[in-house]
Amino acid sequence: MLAWLRADASSYTHWSHKETYAVKTTAEIMISALMSEGVDTVFGIPGAQIYPIFDAIYNTQGKMKLIAPRHEQGAAYMALGYARSTGRSGVFSVVPGPGVLNAGAGLCTAQGVNAPVMCLTGEIPSDFMGQGRGHLHELKNQQETLQGIVKWAGHIAAPDDAASVMREAFEKMHGGRKGAVAVQAPWDVLPAQTDQTNYASIEVESQAVDVDAIAEAVKLLSQCSHPMIMVGGGALDASEEVTRLAEMLEAPVTAFRSGKGVVSDESDFTVCAPAGYKLWQQTDVLIAIGTRMELQLMRWGDMMKRQGSAEGKKVIRIDIDPDEFLRVNTDVNIQGDSATATGQLVEALISANVASSGNRELIISTQQQLLHDIQDIQPQMAYLNLIRDMLPRDGFFVEELCQMGFTSNFGFEVYQPRTYVTPGYQGTLGFGFPTSLGVKVANPDKVVLSITGDGGFMFGMQELATAVQHNIGVITLVFNNAAYGNVLRDQQTRFDGHVVGAEFTNPDFVKMAQAFGAEGYRVNSPVELKPVLEKAIADNKPTLIDVVVPKGSEVSPWKHIHPQAG
């Protein structure tokens, strides 16, 4: 074995060898591992400590694409969009210290929505670690900081460790409940070489499902009359199985954000969250699949106050993460991936000849009534209805923390899983636009539309330069009310009109888009938007549409999101 050789930490030069057998740098092993796992794109910004990573990308001769954003948060969000829209690994690379911290919002969002996102970063030279001597980009303990954000964080202490650490990173990212991971390597280790270069691709095995738990679930469902299915992001790959379950039981399927599209909104059994709340009143068994049950636990009232009462609602939970079963008191826990476990539940129900609930007409009428009722949320619903009519069925809709985004949680129909991209419970303002760029990179032949407020858009507007440079044809609708709309409303209604920090002066977004080299338009109504959006879809170019919304004109959507709050 060739012992690993450290690069000169003062000059950071690449060591060149004369041996005839294969050797690679740590960075080359890391990039080779990505390619072995099917990664074809890295989003990243080169910097001193991570130059070898980018040199290794360069040496793939175009086999690994690099998208270089203008801010570290953009790199993380783009990797998130790539991962969330495909289920595949989204990878980004930023410098340690401030680079990692700038990317932190994207990492915590990826972890919150269980997206397989990997951060590749550097560290200060090995001899300086733990010394607190103020080396460039030093954090007190970067790995511990990362471990507080992501599912797993690994450290490559020597080139011989690179292949095994990268393999563990992929295993953690895709094994069990998916999540974000980070891999760091010191400045001197990344360019150092070894002949220990073999990387074995991971194999994620589906775990066996407890047949006794399935039997208990069948027993509960055979005795109920008003079952309901709640789906979250953990069910995105179980669309076929959940649809079969809903049709068999004639049970309503609802989602809040992350599970939208698991069952198409064209199904007779899919209901928006407000309709789900109406049906919740008489639900006797909830089947929760890959979800934290945020609607039921936090927005519809605490269903667990029943304390096991026979008159209360029963809960069957399907989740791959056993820790979820410890957080909430439920009646039947089925551990396993959503597709496998739900599929086995369907087969068991068929074998037991469990009858459907007969609630199809009730579900359809409740959904139709709520679709009518939510039309009072204006002008948001007028715009959302138009966008839905014009966006192809397989197009991607990336929401944001704005009045349009909040309304879309219940007012925008979704027909396929993964086509509604959300920050989930993290609610990271500014997530939408840069994330949509990653979605488009991963799905270049699909229409990708980002809806954002003017406040959130300004968090990452510089990525218009990235969109133009790499010809990433995202269509961005900036709903411009010159305010943080939700903050403004809260200050006006809950704090006696004490408006502070919620209003601002915006640039001319059309001129700004054109200055970046993007297409820029301004509209004042859904009628004006229609021809502009039609052209933008046909052009497939980086496009910004400034949608002028009079300040304070948007009707609050919160009575439908949190009905108990009104």
Image (cartoon, grey):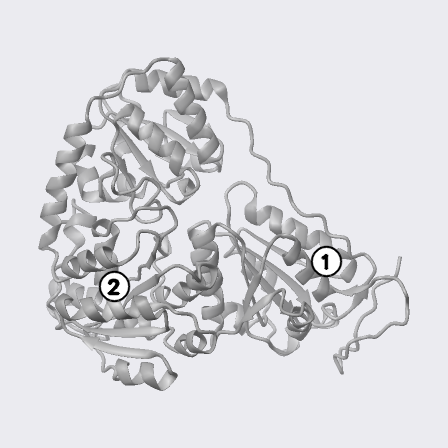
Q: Position of residue 32 (x, y in %)?
A: 69, 59
Regarding residue 113, the answer to whether it shows in the image is: yes
The residue carrying pointer 1 sits among few (fewer than 14), some (14 to 19) or many (20 or more) residues within 10 Å by Cα, namely: many
144 displayed left or right of 536 = right
Judged from the image, the secondary structure of the residue bearing numbered disc 2 is loop
Q: Residue at x 49, y 32 (%)?
A: 336
Regarding residue 132, the answer to whether it shows in the image is: no
Which residue is disc 2 drawn over?
A: 402
Q: Position of residue 124 (x, y in %)?
A: 67, 72
Depth check: give the residue in front, 59 or 55: 59
Q: Residue at x 34, y 28 (%)?
A: 245
> In what quadrant of the picture does the N terminus appear?
bottom right
Q: Is residue 516 above or below residue 451?
A: below
367 displayed left or right of 235 = left
Which residue is disc 1 drawn over?
A: 162
Depth check: give the residue in front, 122 or 44: 44
Asked if marks 2 and 1 touch (Cβ < 8 Å), the reply is no
- Toward which corner of the image does residue 503 lie, by quadrant? bottom left
Amino acid type indicated by mark 2: Cys
Amino acid type indicated by mark 1: Ala
Judged from the image, the secondary structure of the residue bearing numbered disc 1 is helix
